[in-house]
Amino acid sequence: MYVYRIDHRDYPQSWLKQKRFADALRVVERQGNLPIGGLYFADTIAPGFDDTRAAAAGSDLRSPAPPFARDRRNGGYYADTFNATANTGSDFLFVKSYNEWIEGTEIEPGATYGDTYLNLTCQYANAYRGR
């Protein structure tokens, strides 16, 4: 199980709820007499979010919801979403996303940020493996 959209206009800071989602999955395992760890949970991290460009481009590119943006804060938002994963006991780390430029979640190198977000992703992956 994973939560793809960890931030939303109507539910800000949803990434803070990932521990609750992971705990709920473990309850399902126990109640279903499944082996603990038999179901997988993936934490989701993201560098930012901005679908205002998609909204401006037309409704064919996005769901019919009001535009929303979460500032990257020079890597601060990415750090916040990663730090929230520290105690979830997740099995995987899901990065949203490598190159989804239309929603501003890309970590792919580009003119604005260079390879900053690839370097941060490497740091986070190493820290995650070290848990």
Image: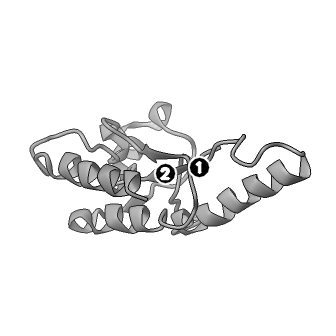
Q: How was this image coloured?
A: one colour
The single residue placed furthest to the top in the displayed view is 60
Label 1 sits on what residue type? Val
Residue on which disc 1 sits: 3
Label 2 sits on what residue type? Thr
Residue 53, x across and y down, in percent:
33, 46
Residue 66, x across and y down, in percent:
52, 55
Q: For this view, does 67 lie left or right of residue 19?
A: left
Residue drawn at x 68%, y 59% as measured from the top left? 21
Residue drawn at x 60%, y 46% as measured from the top left? 2
Where is 120 relative to 100, above or below?
below
Q: For this view, does 71 lie left or right of residue 131?
A: left
Residue 128, x across and y down, in percent:
39, 55
Q: For this view, does 11 lie left or right of residue 103?
A: right
Relative to the observer, which residue lies in front, 71 or 65? Answer: 71
Instruction: Count neighbours of disc 2 (C-alpha within 10 A) and say few if under 14, some if 14 to 19, many if 20 or more.
Output: many
Residue on which disc 2 sits: 44
Q: Are marks 2 and 1 in contact (CB under 8 Å)?
A: yes
Relative to the observer, which residue lies in front, 69 or 79? Answer: 79
Relative to the observer, which residue lies in front, 92 or 67? Answer: 92
Relative to the observer, which residue lies in front, 14 or 49? Answer: 14
Q: Quadrant of the C terminus?
A: bottom left
Residue drawn at x 9%, y 44% as measured from the top left? 111
Marks 2/1: CA distance?
Answer: 6 Å
Residue drawn at x 49%, y 62% as measured from the top left? 85
Residue 52, x across and y down, in percent:
37, 51
